[in-house]
Amino acid sequence: MRIDILTILPRLLDGPFADSIMQRAQTKGICQIHVHNIRDFSVDKHKSVDDYQFGGGAGMVMMAQPIVDAIEHLSQSIQYDEIIYLTPDGVTLNQGFCNQFSLMGNLLLICGHYKGIDQRVRDRYITKEISIGDYVLSGGELAAAVLVDSVVRLIPGVMNDETSALTDSFQDQLLAPPVYTRPAEFNGMKVPDVLTSGNFKAIEEWRMQSALEKTKQRRPDLFDKYNNLAE
Ligand code: 6GU
């Protein structure tokens, strides 16, 4: 998979892909991530990327020209499966989208700033508009990092058995149960007896029960969905 990211703040994306699973996916050659500075495609003498919005009102708008030139330039050599605009007014990202994107070959992500990008870029080029939740970030870069991380970890070969997405299968519908590691007693707090019992059937039952209770408490929406699917 190849992922291209267009941004006016490329340094914000230096960190997120340089370690751990994202780094391994790239060194293994499973995924290539390329970050491009939109400003490099600006043609005026001030290297502008934004301008006042028509109709008035506070806040700048990212100009169409540099973004469109960047898209056109990259599209000469790459056929994108999706051109994704990260924006708080997009459709909320979920595991289903992540699974879909992880099966694709080439993705182009565009990070917005200020009031966002000129609507004409969205109308002509964007195939998906994605938000990562109901809160506002100062730009799309951190959202792009979240999207890339959640997608790349799902590509076959990226994770080993221990970190495999298969082991979080039922957490797609339920929240994860509590986990513990040694020592069995820490500062007077004991690990639940069942986990040290060696009774694997009882352990599985305890985990399922804990996951159900936690989900019902914290995410009644997921709990209802889970029960409807089970019916
Ligand atoms: Cl994709 N962008 C911004 N700026 N804020 C967000 C977001 C995206 N998703 C949630 N909040």
Image: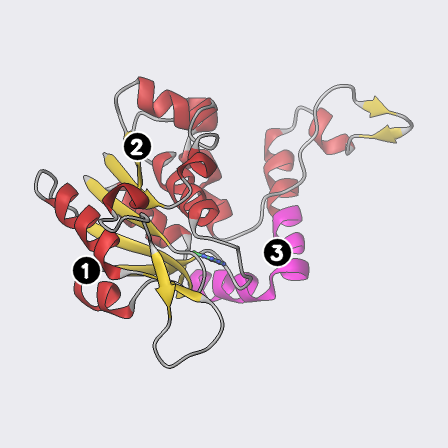
Nearer to us in this view, 182 or 194 = 182
Q: Residue at x 16, y 46 (%)?
A: 80
The image's mark for residue 215 is: 3
Quadrant of image for the C terminus: bottom left
* Residue 142 located left or right of residue 100: right
Nearer to us in this view, 124 or 25 = 124
- Give the tally of numbered discs: 3
Going from N to C along the chain, the mark reached first, 2 or 3, is: 2
Amino acid type of the residue tagged 1 in the rendering: Tyr
Going from N to C along the chain, the mark reached first, 2 or 1, is: 2
- Within 10 Å of the Cα at label 1, are there few (<14), some (14-19), or many (20+) other Cα atoms? some
* Residue 145 located left or right of residue 48: right
Residues rendered magenta in the picture: 209-231
* Residue 214 located left or right of residue 79: right
Mark 1 sits on what residue?
Answer: 125
Q: Which element is circle 1 on?
A: helix
Residue 184 position in % (x across, y down): 79, 22
Q: Which element is circle 2 on?
A: strand
CA gap between label 2 and label 3 equals 35 Å
CA gap between label 1 and label 3 equals 39 Å
Quadrant of image for the N terminus: top left
154 shown above or below 83? above
Disc number lying in front (1 or 3): 1
* CB-based contact (under 8 Å), mark 2 and mark 3: no
Residue that sits furthest to the right in the current view: 188
Amino acid type of the residue tagged 2 in the rendering: Ile
Mark 2 sits on what residue?
Answer: 33
Q: Residue 52: in sight, yes or no?
A: yes
- Within 10 Å of the Cα at label 2, are there few (<14), some (14-19), or many (20+) other Cα atoms? some
Residue that sits furthest to the left in the current view: 76
Is residue 216 inside the magenta stretch? yes
Amino acid type of the residue tagged 3 in the rendering: Thr
